[in-house]
Amino acid sequence: MSTPNTTLSADANSDFNGQNIRSSFDHKRFRNNLSRWRMPRVAITGTLVARLITAFVTEVVNVKRKTLLPATWNVPDVFRDRLGESTGRQRAMFEDQHLLLVLHAPPGPDDEQREGRFFWRKQDGSWASATAAAGQMAVDAHLAEYDEILDALDEREERAHSANDYFELMRQLNPIVRATRNLHTALQQARDMVHDDKRIINFRDQAYSLERRAELLANDTKNTLEYAIARRSEEQAAVGEKMAVAAHRLNLMAAFFFPLATLSAIFGVNLRHGLEPERFDSQWPFVSVTAAGLLAGCVLALYLTRRK
């Protein structure tokens, strides 16, 4: 009877030890698999975090250094640092053989803010711009736009007739005159910075022609407006003189008949006609009053028209 129990006990111990071995084996395999699964996950998570941090820092830097220049332009950092949120005045910047032109679009009479246009001359002499035209043609198109506007204003100056027409023309010319003057100044700065580029010299000369043309047109318009105002003043003065002469004549007539009216009112001249046949002698008072009034009127008129 002891033998079967012993055998059973041995089998139970054997099964228990086998379960412990399998349990220990499965646990180690699970831990190994878990470690293998966690290592790539940790690596991927770290890479994503690093990329997010880099993108965040880059975005912060771009926000702090945000300028009006296109993001694709590989210009010196000093250009972006010297530009703010608005375009500012027209000017030229030069750094490390890079030239940046900050120019203005043709302004209108009611424009409070100026639209900036940027032209970049690279180290190799090629041009880039943020406008529709590319390369050197962008600067040519920019100058041609000013030339077309001056052509239109010149035609309006020829058709203008009234002071209102010239005044409206001056409103449109004044900002163009200032813009062309500053345009010429900016291109002259570029000419002083880059000495060996003939295209910049041509740009400078075209800007000078635009400035001179705008100033001449503005001066002609201003002179014509002043002449129209002076002529209108002369016409008004002539009309005023005629009205003064007419008023003076009326005053003389009133002064001439004023004594007669006064005497007639004092003496109560209420005669029907002054020559009644039954009282022929009654005409003399009437004639006397009339003669005295006219004589007094002549004396008063001579007194008013005397030379001082």
Image (cartoon, helix red, strand yellow):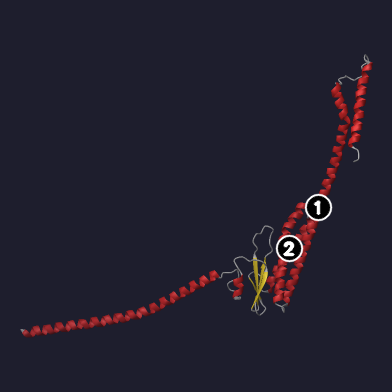
User: Which residue is situated farthest in the top direction here?
Assistant: 278
Q: Which mark is residue 177?
A: 2
N-terminal of the pair, mark 2 or mark 1, is: 2
Crowding at mark 1 (Cα within 10 Å: few <14, some 14-19, many 20+):
some
Q: Would you say 151 lies left or right of 100 here?
A: right
Disc 2 residue type (three-letter): Val
Question: Amino acid under label 1?
Answer: Ala
The answer to whether residue 79 is left or right of residue 167 is left
Q: Is residue 305 above or below residue 234?
A: above
Q: Which residue is mark 1?
A: 228
Which residue is pictured at 73% across the width and 63% down the height?
A: 177
Above or below, 40 relative to 169: below
**Figure check: 72 above or below 153:** below
* Residue 73 in sight here: no
Residue 11, image x, y percentages? 14, 84
Quarter of the C terminus within the rendering:
top right
**Residue 36 seen in the current view:** yes
What is the spatial separation of the Cα atoms under label 2 and label 1, in whole angstroms? 22 Å
Q: Position of residue 99 (x, y in %)?
A: 66, 75
Quadrant of the image containing the N terminus: bottom left
242 or 143: which is nearer to us?
A: 242
Residue 303 relative to residue 62: left or right: right
